[in-house]
């Protein structure tokens, strides 16, 4: 129940942040409206209304801040893992359609995306690649390398009233414009291997259960047991 409410609130925050009226996002208009209520309310007679408007303004700002920090994502893991004993691992280079949420990068660009169409596939050396479409002809990526996968959770991704079969993937990566591979790191103690990695959490959602379970099993690299 709590997750469903949070998903609807995060969806509200996302939509009102993107949608604009007279050049300003709806979220800004909501804040301005509440400030106007506070300023024009006669405190001597209607102070409860002013206090309520201040409280609503505070809660609204907390909602937008928390939703943005969490990438507008709500995820509920499954308590009982499904049986994947008959599910085949992903064949090499076969691309599975997904919708991705989280931070993805390309070159010196890095963006938060929400339920963007893309694909996931297994490449040699047990690495997985996720590509998402950031715009017409433009793509962003994440690469999950063996040994740097921290956790994979299977469950459902919630956004508004929609529920999607999904995976929550936590890993460490060196694929980010925040990490500068050129320069002094190459001359002191071992180059790229000495550069730290960033911790990332991304979410993948799927159109069907077969792809969902196949990607989960491929990422985990074994048959999970509950």
Image (spheres, rainbow, N blue to C red):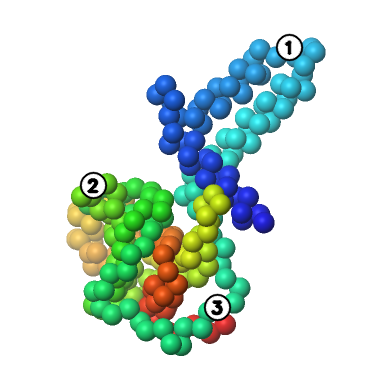
Q: Which residue is mark 1?
A: 42
Q: Secondary structure at mark 3?
A: loop
Quarter of the rendering containing residue 30: top right
3 or 1: mark nearer the eye: 3
Across and down, in percent, residue 224 comes to 49, 83
Tell me if residue 83 can be seen.
yes
Q: Which residue is mark 3?
A: 81
User: What's the distance in space between the residues labelled 2 and 1, CA to CA?
Assistant: 52 Å
Q: Is residue 15 left or right of residue 123?
A: right
Across and down, in percent, residue 222 comes to 42, 84
Whether label 2 touches label 1, CB < 8 Å: no
For marks 3 and 1, the one nearer the N-term is 1
Q: Look at 57% across and 47% down and name the residue there.
A: 8
Tell me if residue 176 can be seen.
no
Across and down, in percent, residue 163 comes to 52, 59
Q: Look at 41% across and 65% down and name the residue there.
A: 207
| Quarter placement of the C terminus | bottom right
Whether label 3 touches label 1, CB < 8 Å: no
For marks 2 and 1, the one nearer the N-term is 1
Q: Secondary structure at mark 1?
A: loop
Across and down, in percent, residue 15 comes to 48, 39
Q: Look at 37% across and 84% down and name the residue there.
A: 88
Q: Is residue 75 left or right of residue 191?
A: right
| Quarter placement of the N terminus | bottom right
Instruction: In this rendered view, identify the residue nearer to me: 181 or 41.
Output: 41
Q: Which residue is mark 2?
A: 136
User: Vertical placement of 137 versus 225: above or below?
Assistant: above
User: What's the distance in space between the residues labelled 3 and 2, CA to CA?
Assistant: 37 Å
User: Vertical placement of 160 versus 88: above or below?
Assistant: above
3 or 2: mark nearer the eye: 2
Dot 2 crowding, Cα within 10 Å, few <14, some 14–19, many 20+? few
């Amino acid at each position: 129940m709590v997750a469903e409410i949070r998903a609807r609130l995060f969806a509200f925050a996302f939509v009102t942040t993107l949608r604009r009226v007279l050049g300003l996002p709806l979220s800004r208009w909501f804040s301005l409206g509440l400030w106007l209520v506070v300023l024009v309310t006669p405190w001597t007679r209607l102070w409860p209304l002013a206090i309520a408007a201040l409280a609503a303004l505070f809660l609204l700002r907390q909602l937008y801040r928390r939703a943005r920090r969490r990438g507008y994502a709500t995820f509920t893991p499954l308590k009982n893992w499904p049986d994947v004993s008959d599910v085949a691992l992903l064949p090499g280079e076969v691309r599975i359609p997904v919708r991705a949420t989280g931070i993805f990068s390309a070159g010196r660009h890095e963006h938060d995306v929400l339920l963007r169409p893309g694909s996931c596939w297994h490449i040699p050396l047990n690495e997985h690649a996720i590509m998402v479409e950031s715009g017409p002809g433009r793509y962003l990526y994440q690469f999950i390398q063996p040994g740097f996968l921290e956790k994979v959770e299977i469950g459902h991704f919630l956004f508004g009233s929609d529920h999607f079969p999904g995976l929550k993937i936590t890993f460490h990566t060196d694929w980010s414009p925040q990490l500068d591979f050129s320069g002094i790191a190459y001359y002191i103690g071992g180059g790229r291997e000495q550069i730290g990695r960033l911790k990332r959490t991304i979410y993948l959602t799927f159109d069907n259960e077969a792809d969902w379970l196949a990607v989960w099993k491929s990422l985990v690299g074994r048959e999970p047991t509950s």
